[in-house]
Image (cartoon, helix red, strand yellow):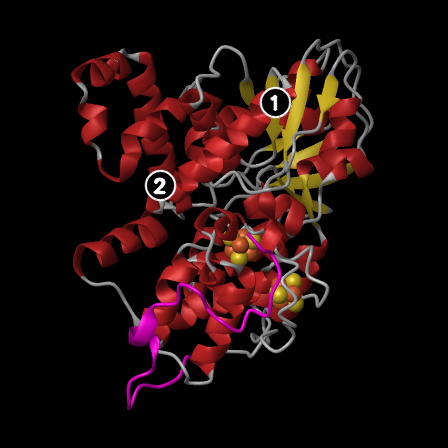
Amino acid sequence: MSTHGSGQQLQGADSSASFRREGEQPLALTTPLSLDSCMRCGFCLAACPTYRHLGRETHSPRGRLALVKAATEGQLDPVTALRQPLDLCLGCRGCEPVCPAGVVYGHVLEEARAALAQRNRPSGLKRWGQRFLFEWLVPNTRLLRFLGGLLWFYEKLGVRWLARATGILKRLPMHLGEFEAALTDLAPPTERLPHGALYPAAGERRARVAFLTGCVAEALLHRTNRRTVQLLRACGFEVVIPKGQTCCGALHAHAGELEMARRLAKQNIAAFEASGAEFYVSNAGGCGAQLLEYPHLLRDDPQWAERAGRFAARVRDVAELIATQGALPALRRVNERVTYQDSCHLANVQKVKTEPRDLLRRVPGLELVEMTESDRCCGSAGSYSLLHFDVSMRILDEKMEQLRRTGATVVTTGNPGCLLQLRLGIHRAGLAGQVRAMHTVDLLAEACEKLPKL
Ligand code: SF4
Ligand code: SF4
């Protein structure tokens, strides 16, 4: 498959149904963004997982940009021409670092999805499903904790065995039963971090940091959150868990629900400002990237734009913070062959690639091996793996072949969604028992000779 070309011909576009009907308005973006900067050079095609797996120009960054441009100029019907190409985009932003014109594709995608959502509001059950997810579940810490607690009971009380034996999991909608395999080693509700808590640094204090607990991690990976705080303390940081913090809003922004994303951003800015911390830390690549996007999200709000800029200047990924400002404590030997899978948003938006690898290399006995295309999306991409299961699994299964070739016994990553996806991939590839998927923080915490108790 050629990766370059003129890009004039949108192979696979939705035929004549794509052309705008009389009286229909062109797609209106809030800001024109970088639509004219694309030179159609095609350098981004090889970096795009959906182009590789679907093989169509309309599912490439260049093709999607051309479609959005044509829809804003009134040449195409936005809904029929754009819906599928934009829906099937992972939003991984792997196309940005390779673009010589500096096209910020992620902003175009977000704007186009938001404009499309205004035009094409789902109705009935789908609308209620979206409202439940975006407005009631994800920003609601108590509800997330409650659901996470139910899943812990499910694992510990033998209900899992019953569910598997009766085959009920296979009947769940949206392939939810398959994701059940990724839910391993759940921690009890008692291990959750109380919001409002303050934990002193172990030894010399380097800085006060405020920790974002996230939504997926709050429900399912709170042991990783706990270890993050323990590791930060061991590295010399005083850690506060800001009260009033909420979901970062990434899921909302990626789905075009920008107003809701702005509300959540303002709530987080206020909560973190009140913490008095010098740095705001996340252990989730996707959440940290969204925190960095707050200035862009609130750019037209005179009351918040400046505050958002100050907020973003303090945001750090946990590995970045420890590598640049902290001091790892004494580490014991870890005799494992380890490979690192980049979280797309951690690498492509936060530009954090070397720091987690540097930290892993400092563990005695640990052999770090590079996986081919470790910076290529694993197919998780927020809710993508649920909404587009087949494409997501094609991408994941290829990733598992690359993982198998490394001979690694551990694969680490810096984002909860990627971690769950890798666990599912290991299960699907029959690698369980040979390879473990871990958050980088969990591996580093395991390597610490002495981790402060909470
Ligand atoms: S998005 Fe960038 S890399 Fe891709 S075709 Fe346009 S200019 Fe080239
Ligand atoms: S965000 Fe990812 S899937 Fe979407 S066009 Fe860019 S590289 Fe392709």
Mark yes or no: residue 200 visible: no
**Magenta highlight: main SS:** loop
Which residue bears the numbered disc 1?
405
Q: Position of residue 344 (x, y in %)?
A: 59, 45
Question: Residue 185 appears in which quarter of the rendering?
Answer: top left
Judge the density around disc 1: few (<14), some (14-19), many (≥20) Cα neighbours within 10 Å.
few
Q: Is residue 251 left or right of residue 130?
A: right
Q: Is residue 174 above or below residue 45?
A: above
Q: Do we see residue 40 in this rendering?
A: yes
Give the CA distance from mark 2 to mark 1.
24 Å
Question: 230 or 400: which is nearer to us?
Answer: 400
Residue 218 image position (x, y, % from top left): 46, 34
Image coordinates for residue 71, horizontal then vertical, percent: 43, 78
Residue type, label 2: Phe
Segment colored magenta: 1-29
Query: In which image quadrant can residue 364 be found?
Result: top right
Q: Is mark 2 within 8 Å of ligand 2?
A: no
Residue 6 appears left or right of 190: right
Please rate how many residues cluster around mark 2, counting C-alpha atoms within 10 Å: few if below 14, some from 14 to 19, many from 20: some
Q: Position of residue 385 (x, y in %)?
A: 39, 41
Q: Is residue 54 left or right of residue 376?
A: left
Q: Mark 1: which amino acid?
A: Arg
Mark nearer the viewer, 2 or 1:
1
Q: Earlier in the sequence, mark 2 or mark 1?
A: 2
- Element under label 2? helix
Residue at the spot of label 2: 389
Marker disc for residue 62? none
Q: Secondary structure at mark 1?
A: helix
Up/down of 403 relative to 52, above or below = above
Write the residue at 29% across / 90% down: 23
